[in-house]
Amino acid sequence: MRHLVLHPSAVLRRRADPVDTIDDGIVSLVEEMFQILEAEQGLGLAAPQVGASKRLFVTDGDEEHGGGKRVFINPKFILIDGLLEASEEGCLSLPNIRGSVRRQPHVIVEALDIDGKSFTLEGSALMARCWQHEMDHLDGVLIIDRMSVIDRIVNRKRLRAMESAGERD
Ligand SMILES: [Zn+2]
């Protein structure tokens, strides 16, 4: 059984590999990711967060803005639009760390579903933010890289504690 991977694990900093074939391994990875996402009551979870360096993420929640229980395999943005908006974000891999991140409010994503079928989906508000957050994970980017300088200072002690605990593992 896979488990949630926390900062400063190296897998969170790697650029994830594309999914070549949606085989049984990918299907069970996705099932386990949904279980973890549900247990953690999160909105989205990317494969590197459970130790799998694969380009896929899952979401659960906010049906209204393009959300819902969905899987995005080899996702890419075909549109990112609108003026940058700042909003507070957290991350399951960075417990107790929150900070303001600026993102664009409107995106269209193209991805494969679990059957290998291509789809495009429009997201706004919370889901547009969620998808950009999850896509960052696939490129090894975390919210601590994107948050304001002030938020970085606010979180500095917690972050250092997490990083030295990680080094002991
Ligand atoms: Zn995250």
Image (cartoon, rainbow, N blue to C red):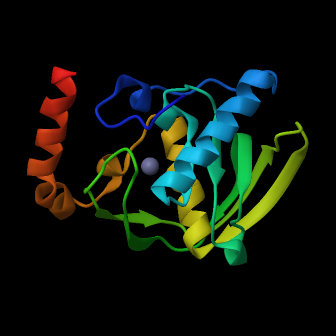
At 71% from the left and 78% from the top, the residue drawn is 64
Vertical order, 80 against 12 (above or below): below
104 or 33, nearer to the observer? 33
The spot of residue 86 in percent (x, y) is 39, 72
At 45% from the left and 25% from the top, the residue drawn is 14
The spot of residue 104 in percent (x, y) is 54, 67
The spot of residue 3 in percent (x, y) is 46, 34
Quarter of the picture holding the N terminus:
top right
32 or 166, nearer to the observer? 32
Q: Quadrant of residue 122?
A: bottom right
Vertical order, 80 against 74 (above or below): below
Vertical order, 38 against 102 (above or below): above
The spot of residue 135 in percent (x, y) is 57, 46
Tally the marks.
0
Q: Residue furthest bottom?
A: 64
Quarter of the picture holding the C terminus:
top left
At 28% from the left and 32% from the top, the residue drawn is 8
Apparent side of residue 46 relative to residue 55 in the rendered image (left or right): left
36 or 88, nearer to the observer? 36
At 73% from the left and 54% from the top, the residue drawn is 70
Q: Quadrant of residue 126?
A: bottom right
